[in-house]
Amino acid sequence: LIRNLLAVTSQKNLALSRRIFHTSPKTIRGRLLSYLSAQALRENSRSFAIPFDRQQLADYLGVDRSALSAELGRMRTEGLIRFRKNEFELLREP
């Protein structure tokens, strides 16, 4: 019982630490790049799907959904990313 409790507590602590790491950049672009880069590393691929829709991603990163969508559009125009719904592809480094 104690081992299970410790495992659950550790996993929750790691998840919160990751979220703090992704929300520490000041700009929306910085937060997005931090999160998307971490997802790409986790999947070991430049193409990956995230477990969030736009509103959930905005809530996770602590930003407004419309500002998040606008920044995603700018990043697409600049050739940094390609996306469709919750599927992303990192094209190049910023």
Image: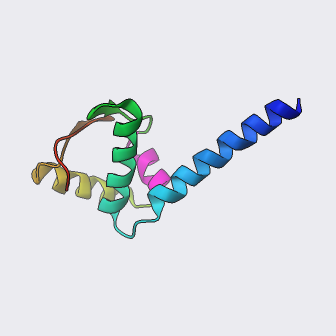
- In percent of width and height, residue 39 lies at 39, 39
Taking the view exactly as shown, the residue that stands out farthest to the bottom is 26
Magenta stretch prevailing secondary structure:
helix
Which quadrant would the C terminus be assigned to in this image?
A: bottom left
Looking at the image, which is closer to me, 48 or 66?
48
- In percent of width and height, residue 5 lies at 82, 36
Looking at the image, which is closer to me, 36 or 3?
3
**Residue extent of the magenta highlight:** 53-61
> Would residue 73 be found to the left or right of residue 23 on screen?
left
- In percent of width and height, residue 67 lies at 31, 61
> Would residue 65 be found to the left or right of residue 17 on screen?
left
The residue that appears at 59% across and 45% down in the rendered structure is 15
Which quadrant would the N terminus be assigned to in this image?
A: top right
Looking at the image, which is closer to me, 76 or 44?
44
The residue that appears at 49% across and 57% down in the rendered structure is 21
> Would residue 24 be found to the left or right of residue 85 on screen?
right
Q: Looking at the rendering, which quadrant does residue 43 occupy? A: top left
Q: Residue 29: say if magenta.
A: no
The residue that appears at 60% across and 51% down in the rendered structure is 16
